[in-house]
Image (cartoon, rainbow, N blue to C red):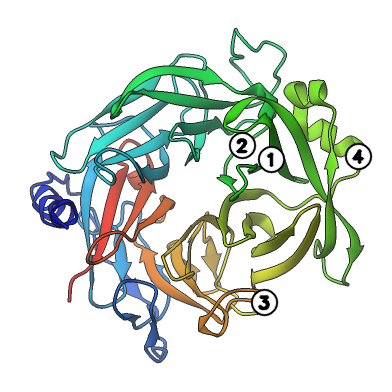
Amino acid sequence: MMRVQWQVGSLVSVLGAAVIVACAKDQTVLAPRATPDAASFDGMPGPFEFTPVASSAVCTNGGNATNPLLLAEGYSQSVIASEPSYADVPDMNTLNENGPEAGRFMYRTHEVGSNGSVSITDLKTGQTRILVQRTDWESLDGITWTPWGTLLFSEETNAAGRRDPNVPQAVAGLVYEIIFAENDPSTVASVVARPAIGSKSHEGMRFDSQGNLYSISERTPGYIFKFVPDKAGDLSSGQTYVMKIVTPDGGVGTGQGTWIPLNRTQVQIDASAAADAVAATGFGRPEDLEYRAGTLYAAITSEHRIIALDLNGDDVHVYDYVRRGLNTTDEFSMPDNLSFDNKGNLYITEDPGGSTSSGKRGDDIWVAVRPNGQGHGGPAESVLRFATLTDCEAEPTGIYVDTRGLRSTVYVNIQHRGGDRLDKTLAIVRSK
């Protein structure tokens, strides 16, 4: 309990002391629209209630520098890190979820063209620094913990411009594993490439309860992969599979599927080409993944939907969990990053929202309410706008929900803010 208390109290004091560089034209106007009824579900410890934001912000270039997001009433935002304390283009976030001082450190990848890095913020002291960096790393994106306490991060590129000298055969992005010093989640002992997982444009990565790793290739057509290690807890070798729907149900990319094994050598060269060769089921720019209770969720960005894959051994049942026109309005656009709260409600960021008939609008953050308030197995009950971005040039990335405290914190990066070199990482908490 004492550890939880410093997370909330110390974090708030750090946030309040953050120095924020203001910019002009911070006015935000909402398009007139009736406000939906208040939504209530137990997504956080105690009732999590909010009145959905009525519409996307009519954004400006630069937006509101102090409060980049317009939030549901009763929630507040604070900056926990920003440029120049870390590198440009922060992408995905995670905390140290287990082990010594769990929840103290935030890790994020940086999606720069070269000299890619992973940064770390100490939420107790407010200090941010580079954790690891290398000149040949490019477009770092995905980040996730292994079941054995190491940290994976990945490159999001279909054509590597700076190949890893130790893995010269890889034509696209790679996955790397950070091994930490014993009992010290802020000190790196080594970083090792894991080409057996596949050379491709990586983003979302998630493990299931058996230690299998799921990943995607971000392109069109892009694929969903499963990596089964030859030895539990060892990513140096294993079999990569790609998902293929064998019995369509009449929808696009839905129905009964299976996992097709891929040539191990080819996967390390170009996993997407290996998937092309077996006529795997392709999707329009798959990006982030989440896993919960036997189901994998994938954001299919250019198709404006999130699919669910119910996993049962070699069998896969694929259905639409969130889809524009099914359980969202037409304003739901290009879902990108995903994160669950502890009750199964799914947070979704857009990339980017784009324009509407009424003019340019900011990108949104949505919450997909678990079906019928329990479990899964069908589409989300509803999809509600939780926040909207005031900056036309920016997008929200790396959504991450920390549910371990007395009240949950939602972390999100604001990428490309003000056009360039003004990016921020925000913490969102319930203020009343």
The disc, 4 or 3, on the residue closer to the chain's N-terminal end is 4
Distance of label 1 from label 4 (alpha carbons): 15 Å
Report which quarter residue 342 is drawn in: bottom left
- The residue at 70%/63% (across/down) is 310
Pick whichever of labels 3 and 2 is earlier in the sequence.
Answer: 2
Q: Which residue is mark 4?
A: 278
Relative to 124, is 176 on the left or the right? right
Residue 222, image x and y in percent?
74, 45
Q: Secondary structure beneath disc 1?
A: loop
In the picture, the disc for residue 378 is 3
Give x and y (percent) for residue 283: 75, 52
Question: Circle 2: is it few (<14), some (14-19), or many (20+) Cα within 10 Å?
Answer: many
Residue in the picture at 89% in, 65% down:
248
Q: CA distance from mark 4 to mark 3?
A: 29 Å
Q: Nearer the viewer, residue 431 or 392?
A: 431
Please name the residue that numbered disc 1 is placed on.
Answer: 217
Label whose residue precedes the other's in the sequence (1 or 3): 1
What's the distance in space between the residues labelled 2 and 1, CA to CA? 5 Å
Q: Answer yes or no: do the residues labelled 2 and 1 have beta carbons within 8 Å?
A: yes
Q: Are marks 1 and 3 in contact (CB under 8 Å)?
A: no
Quarter of the figure with the N terminus: bottom left
State the image coordinates of residue 18 (x, y, percent, origin top left): 13, 46
Please tell me how crowded label 3 is: few (under 14), some (14-19), or many (20+) other residues with Cα within 10 Å: some
Please say if the residues under marks 4 and 3 sit with CB atoms less than 8 Å apart: no
**Mark in front: 3 vs 2:** 3
Tell me, yes or no, whether the two marked residues, 3 and 2, touch with CB atoms within 8 Å.
no
The mark found on residue 359 in the picture is none
Inspect the image, locate mark 3, and give the three-letter code of the amino acid beneath it.
Gly
Q: How far is disc 1 from disc 3 in space, using C-alphas?
A: 25 Å
Q: Which residue is mark 2?
A: 202
Q: CA distance from mark 4 to mark 2?
A: 20 Å
Residue in the picture at 25% in, 40% down: 82
